[in-house]
Image: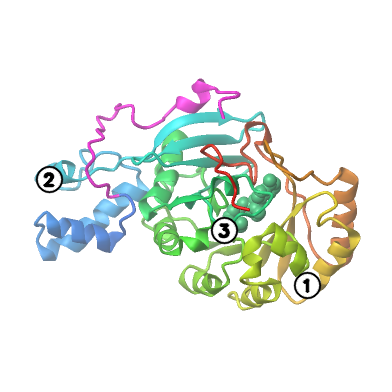
């Protein structure tokens, strides 16, 4: 993470500098509260019941649509209420511990929370859009064999406010407020950073509700993608509660291979996973992620089997060249094998773009995120 440390690019707009008089004082943060939660907080401050709903909506807009980092600037709230809020609560962002910028413009930040937990956050600019890759857990319990985050194990879940804090932090750093400004930089969210979002579902749901709220971050469902390795019972809930796009980390076309690569397959196998996908709200195409590992899952028969598996689904396959990391046991498939695999999928009627690795030089690409020395992996 310290290679290519470009403080000039990274430190701009980094929070915690006190430029806006913001103080970190260990008070509870309001970030993560929805309008009802904010109304409850206002009740604690003694705000009259008839006023609470309106004040909560004002607060909500200040926090999530305008990116306020102090109560002082909330000019349409009475001064005594602003003072009372400032005394009891804060709007702090995670602390930035390190940052790096790739040759291709991808940025990665190492963020720290109060208890010492750390996650990585990645921003990927592309023409006409900008994608923020959020982490949902500190580490990950799933143990996928080719993934660097897995070497950490699970440290803890992130709270809704900590997930949202990543978005607010990035928008501060990118000078991207207010949320509805024309030409905004953060247009898309993907839950493809550290962790398995569907194993921290309550927090993810709460955070994404705020991201979707029109008077919050105001992002559309089509611009938010939740990626799962296959926590099958939660897939239906995700469709029902949020209706965002679904990505599935498939990575193998038969159970024996998938059992080994993505161990959660032993609990919910490919058939169960695809059944949940078939029932995902109609009209939304599902992205299947497939990391190509030399000699492991990149044979022609794998491609043909994949075509058969996905034949009755509105599917697209994202082929991900394996991104190596220090200590990884796999090799990326050669360009020739990637081309052959892709041709076979396309011949079977599947759209199968090869995902351009972004930020590889700063270990910010898929599966390269980690924020602590690895624990020894259980056998
Ligand atoms: N736990 C969720 C969210 C993580 S998304 C999930 O598994 O979907 C991160 C994506 O990168 C997943 O598809 C993951 O399988 C993939 N990935 C992990 N390690 C990788 C590596 N070394 N190279 C390329 N992709 C990798």
> Spatial distance from mark 2 to mark 1, Cα to Cα?
58 Å
Residue 336 versus residue 59: which sits nearer the camera? 336
Q: Which residue bears the numbered disc 3? A: 225
Residue 263 versus residue 206: which sits nearer the camera? 263
Mark 1 and mark 3 in contact? Answer it, CB < 8 Å: no
Task: Judge the density around disc 1: few (<14), some (14-19), many (≥20) Cα neighbours within 10 Å.
Answer: some
| Residue 176 seen anywhere in this rendered image of the structure | no
Q: Residue at x 84, y 55 (%)?
A: 298
The response on whether ligand 1 sits within 8 Å of label 3 is no
> Spatial distance from mark 3 to mark 2, Cα to Cα?
38 Å
Which type of secondary structure does the marked residue at label 1 adopt? helix
Q: Is residue 25 left or right of residue 228?
A: left
Residue 43 versus residue 266: which sits nearer the camera? 266
Question: From the viewer's perspective, is residue 244 above or below residue 360?
Answer: below
| Residue 350 seen anywhere in this rendered image of the structure | yes
Measuring from the top left, give residue 115's x and y in whole percent.
Answer: 35, 41
Q: Which residue bears the numbered disc 2? A: 84
Region in magenta: 1-30
Mark 3 or mark 2: name the one nearer the start of the chain: 2
Q: Is residue 245 left or right of residue 95?
A: right
């Amino acid at each position: 993470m310290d290679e290519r440390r470009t403080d000039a690019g990274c430190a701009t707009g980094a929070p915690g500098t006190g430029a806006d008089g913001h103080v970190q004082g260990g008070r509870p943060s309001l970030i993560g509260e929805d309008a009802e939660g904010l109304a409850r907080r206002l009740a604690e401050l003694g705000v009259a019941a008839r006023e609470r709903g309106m004040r909560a909506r004002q607060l909500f807009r200040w926090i999530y649509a305008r990116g306020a980092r102090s109560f002082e600037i909330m000019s349409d709230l009475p001064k005594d209420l602003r003072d009372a809020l400032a005394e009891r609560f804060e709007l702090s962002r995670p602390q930035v511990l390190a940052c790096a910028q790739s040759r291709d413009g991808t940025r990665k930040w190492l963020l720290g929370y109060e208890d010492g937990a750390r996650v990585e956050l990645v921003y990927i600019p592309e023409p006409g859009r900008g994608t923020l890759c959020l982490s949902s857990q500190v580490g990950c319990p799933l143990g996928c064999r080719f993934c660097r985050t897995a070497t950490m194990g699970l440290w803890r879940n992130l709270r809704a406010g900590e997930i949202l804090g990543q978005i607010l932090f990035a928008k501060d750093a990118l000078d991207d407020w207010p949320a509805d400004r024309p030409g905004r930089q953060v247009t898309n969210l993907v839950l493809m950073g550290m962790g398995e979002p569907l194993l921290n579902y309550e927090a993810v749901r709460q955070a994404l509700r705020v991201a979707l709220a029109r008077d919050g971050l105001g992002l559309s469902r089509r611009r938010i993608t939740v990626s799962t390795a296959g926590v099958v019972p939660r897939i239906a809930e995700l469709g029902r509660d949020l209706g965002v796009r679904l990505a599935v980390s498939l990575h193998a076309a038969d159970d024996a291979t998938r059992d080994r690569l993505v161990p959660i397959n032993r609990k919910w196998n490919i058939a169960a996973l695809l059944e949940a996908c078939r029932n995902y709200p109609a009209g939304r195409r599902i992205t299947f992620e497939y990391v190509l590992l030399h000699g492991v899952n990149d044979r022609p028969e794998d491609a043909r089997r994949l075509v058969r598996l996905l034949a009755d689904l509105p599917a697209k396959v994202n082929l991900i060249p394996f991104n190596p990391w220090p200590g990884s046991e796999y090799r990326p498939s050669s360009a020739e094998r990637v081309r052959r695999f892709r041709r076979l999928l396309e011949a079977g009627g599947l759209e199968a773009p090869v995902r351009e690795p972004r930020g590889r030089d700063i270990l910010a690409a898929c599966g390269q995120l980690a924020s602590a020395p690895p624990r020894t992996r259980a056998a």
